[in-house]
C-alpha cells in the first residue's frame, strides 16, 4: 500500500480525487462508487483506518516522518485535496449542466452506475445462496432509501455534526450518496449550497486581504456551521473507515455482495426520468440563499418512448456504460503489460 508514487501517479490520484469530490456533491451519486471503480477504495479505507492511537503517539513524539508513512498521508492528502478542489471547480461545472441539461446528466450517471455494477460484479466469484441473499438485502436497503421523505432543515450544531458523520458515508460506502442522505436529513441546502457559497466568498475575501467578514454575523454563522460539519465529516471518516476495514478483513465477500446490491438499489435515486417536487410552506415555494427553489423530492415516471429526448437520454446512458467499460479495458491492458 505504501509505495513510491511518480509525479504521474500523483496527478492521476489527484484527478481521481476530483471525480470523487464531484460525485459526492451530486445527490444520488456516491463518491464511494467512484473510488471502487477507479481502484482505490480499499486503500482509502485502510489509510483512514491508520488514523489511530499509534498514529497519535507518533505525532506527539515528533516522529513526523514515521507518522506520514504509517498513515499513508501522501495518498490521503492528494485524494482529499482533489475532492476539496473539486467543490470549487468541477462541481460548479456539474451544477451548470444539471441546471441546463438535467435529463442527460442523470442519464449519464445512470449509465455509469449500471457499468459500475458490472465492473464490480464481474470479478466476484463466490456466488452462492448466502452472498446472493446479502446482495438482495443491499439492493432493498438502497432502493428503500431512495423513496424516503426528506425531513425539515435543522441548524442545531449537534445535528450538523451528526450530518457530517452520516453525510461522509458517500465516500466510504459505495452506492450510498452522502448528498442524497443530507437531502433526507433536510440539510443539503444549508451544508452543501449556502455554507459552501459563503465559504467561497470568505476565501476570496481572505485572498484579497479583506477581513470585513469577521464583522458579518451571517458569514460567521455559516462558517461556524461548515466548521462543525467538517469536524463531523472527519470524525465520520475515521470511525466508519475503522468499522469498514474490520468488516472487509473478516467478511470481504459478504461486504462486497452488499455493496453490489446497494449500488444496484441506488439506481432508484439516479433514475433520469423524474420531476422535481419543490419544498413549499403555506402554498409558497421556498428559496435558498442563492434564490433557487429548494428541492424536496422527486416524482419518477416511465419515459415516453416516442419522445426524441428519451432516445437522446438513452444514448447518454450508453455513453456512461461505455466509459466504465473503457476504464475496465484500460485497467486490464495495464495489468497485461
Image (spheres, rainbow, N blue to C red):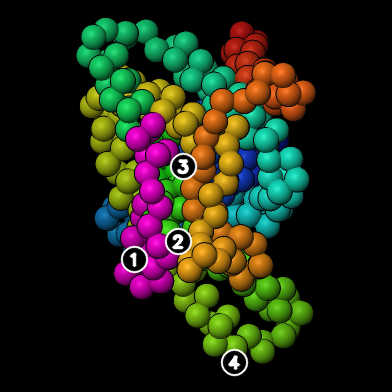
Q: Is residue 238 shown above or below 248? A: below
* x, y percent for residue 220: 53, 82
Identify which residue is drawn at 49% across, 48% down: 297
Q: CA distance from mark 4 to mark 1?
A: 26 Å
Toward the bottom, the furthest residue is 215
Q: Earlier in the sequence, mark 2 or mark 4?
A: 2
In this orientation, does residue 168 appear? no
Q: Is residue 193 shown above or below 268? A: below
Please say if the residues under marks 3 and 1 sit with CB atoms less than 8 Å apart: no
- What secondary structure is found at the residue carrying circle 1? helix
Label of residue 215 in the image: 4
Q: In front: 93, or 278?
A: 278
Q: Nearer the viewer, mark 4 or mark 3?
A: 3
* x, y percent for residue 286: 55, 66
In what quadrant of the picture does the N terminus appear? top left
Q: How crowded is the residue under tag 3: few (<14 C-alpha within 10 Å), some, or many (20+)? A: many
Please say if the residues under marks 2 and 1 sit with CB atoms less than 8 Å apart: yes
Q: How crowded is the residue under tag 1: few (<14 C-alpha within 10 Å), some, or many (20+)? A: some
- Quadrant housing residue 217: bottom right
Q: Earlier in the sequence, mark 3 or mark 2?
A: 3
Question: Which residue is identified by label 3?
Answer: 177
Q: CA distance from mark 2 to mark 1?
A: 9 Å
Identify which residue is drawn at 66% across, 67% down: 291
Amino acid at each position: 500500500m505504501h509505495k513510491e508514487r511518480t509525479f504521474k501517479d500523483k496527478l492521476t490520484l489527484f484527478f481521481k480525487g476530483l471525480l470523487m469530490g464531484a460525485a459526492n456533491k451530486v445527490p444520488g451519486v456516491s463518491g464511494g462508487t467512484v473510488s471502487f471503480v477507479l481502484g482505490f477504495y480499499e486503500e482509502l479505507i485502510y489509510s483512514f483506518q491508520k488514523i489511530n492511537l499509534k498514529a497519535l503517539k507518533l505525532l506527539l513524539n515528533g516522529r513526523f516522518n514515521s507518522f506520514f508513512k504509517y498513515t499513508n498521508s501522501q495518498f490521503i492528502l492528494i485524494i482529499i485535496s482533489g475532492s476539496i478542489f473539486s467543490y470549487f471547480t468541477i462541481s460548479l461545472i456539474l451544477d451548470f449542466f444539471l441546471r441546463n441539461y438535467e435529463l442527460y446528466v442523470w442519464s449519464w450517471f445512470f449509465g455509469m452506475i449500471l457499468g459500475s455494477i458490472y465492473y464490480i460484479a464481474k470479478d466476484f466469484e463466490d456466488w452462492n445462496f448466502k452472498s446472493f441473499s446479502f446482495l438482495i438485502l443491499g439492493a432493498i436497503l438502497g432502493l428503500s432509501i431512495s423513496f424516503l421523505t426528506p425531513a425539515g432543515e435543522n441548524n442545531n450544531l449537534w445535528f450538523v455534526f451528526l450530518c457530517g458523520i452520516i453525510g461522509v458515508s458517500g465516500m466510504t460506502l459505495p452506492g450510498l450518496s452522502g448528498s442524497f442522505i443530507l437531502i433526507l436529513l433536510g440539510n443539503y441546502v444549508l451544508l452543501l449550497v449556502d455554507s459552501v457559497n459563503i465559504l467561497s466568498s470568505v476565501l476570496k475575501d481572505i485572498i484579497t486581504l479583506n477581513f470585513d467578514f469577521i464583522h458579518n454575523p451571517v458569514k460567521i454563522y455559516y462558517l461556524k456551521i461548515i466548521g462543525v460539519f467538517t469536524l463531523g465529516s472527519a470524525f465520520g471518516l475515521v470511525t466508519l473507515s475503522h468499522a469498514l476495514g474490520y468488516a472487509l478483513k473478516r467478511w470481504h465477500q459478504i461486504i462486497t455482495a452488499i455493496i453490489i446490491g446497494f449500488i444496484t438499489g441506488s439506481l432508484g435515486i439516479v433514475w433520469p426520468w423524474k420531476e422535481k417536487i419543490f419544498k413549499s410552506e403555506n402554498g409558497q415555494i421556498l428559496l435558498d440563499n442563492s434564490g433557487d427553489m429548494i428541492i424536496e423530492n422527486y416524482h419518477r415516471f416511465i419515459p415516453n418512448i416516442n419522445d426524441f429526448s428519451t432516445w437522446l437520454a438513452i444514448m447518454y446512458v450508453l455513453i456512461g456504460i461505455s466509459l466504465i467499460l473503457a476504464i475496465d479495458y484500460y485497467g486490464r491492458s495495464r495489468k497485461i503489460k
